[in-house]
Image (cartoon, rainbow, N blue to C red):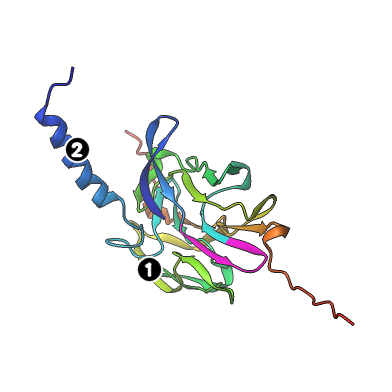
Amino acid sequence: MYTYNLFDDMVKLRNVFDDFFTERRDHEGNTEFPPIRITEEDESITISAVMPGISAEDIDIQLVDNSLFIRGEKKEDYENHPYIRRERFFGGFKKSIKLPFRVNSGEIKADLSEGILKIRLTKSEEAKPKKIQIS
Amino acid sequence: MIERKVPMNGAEQRVYIPLTDIYETGDLYSLKMEMPGIKKENLDIVIHENELRITAKRGSHEEKENVKYSEYSDRDYYRVFKIGYDVDRNRVDANLDKGVLTLKLYKSEEVKPKKISINQAN
């Protein structure tokens, strides 16, 4: 037997709102292309940026003070044929990331694989965790 | 990438719907799908009846406690396309490069445009 429950309708309405806010393109709204992720280890931090279809030579990475700039261009790969669907986007992009601490500018490694750019930065000596001895 | 809830194995799951470009020529349909972070061994491409189903397991790459900030999530990719019977089930090329999957679905011989030669009657 079905009993009407007002809360079922409220949950449904809440789901409508939740879906509205989560079902959007990642590069729309509050984030600029490319979407990034920052992970921190003891001695380093890694910045990952999602950039499918972009070649390494079309990306320019710069470290200025403690900000990291990623600039580049995603080049069109359209063929000269009638398209049924066009959802991907192309063009130039630029993003700056403020690093949470100073990094050692001599030790930066960048790697691009499976459409994800990973930049590994080593923390400067002052930013590394230190064990303090109790005297 | 578009995030969406889809029914899968009886439950609802949040997945990324890969952005796709499709063009058609006389011989084939070509699909380009953006699936960053996917290795070819985690990719599953199935044609069943009139559906082309693409599933890719993303898996997590980083230790969760190390992630300080993120603008994307490690969701799986999933997308289904309806295909017609003009597609040759046995001739599909797939190539994964820089996080972009390119699929070439060849049309079967019967539906390809044919030039008809006219026999000259003497």
Q: Is residue A1 above or below residue A29?
A: above
Range drawn in magenta: B19-30
- Residue B64 percent across, percent down from the top left: 40, 39
Vertical position of residue A77 compared to residue B19: above or below:
below
Residue at 74%, 73% in the rendered image: B115
Q: Which one is nearer the viewer's eye here, B3 or B83?
A: B83
Between label 1 and label 2, give the one nearer the viewer.
2
Farthest-out residue, left: A6
According to the picture, the residue beneath numbered tag 1 turns out to be A95
**Principal secondary structure, stretch drawn in magenta:** strand
> Which quarter of the figure has residue B94?
bottom right
Q: Is residue A135 visible?
A: no
Place of residue B70 in the rendered image (x, y in percent of width and height, measured from the top left)? 36, 51
- The residue most toward the right is B122
Quadrant of the image containing the N terminus of chain A: top left
What's the residue type where badge 2 is placed?
Answer: Lys
Please check the rendered image and state whether residue B26 is part of the magenta-colored stretch, yes or no. yes
Q: Which sits in the foreground, B47 or A12?
A: B47
Q: Residue at x 19, y 38 (%)?
A: A12
Judging from the image, mark 1 belongs to the subunit labelled: A
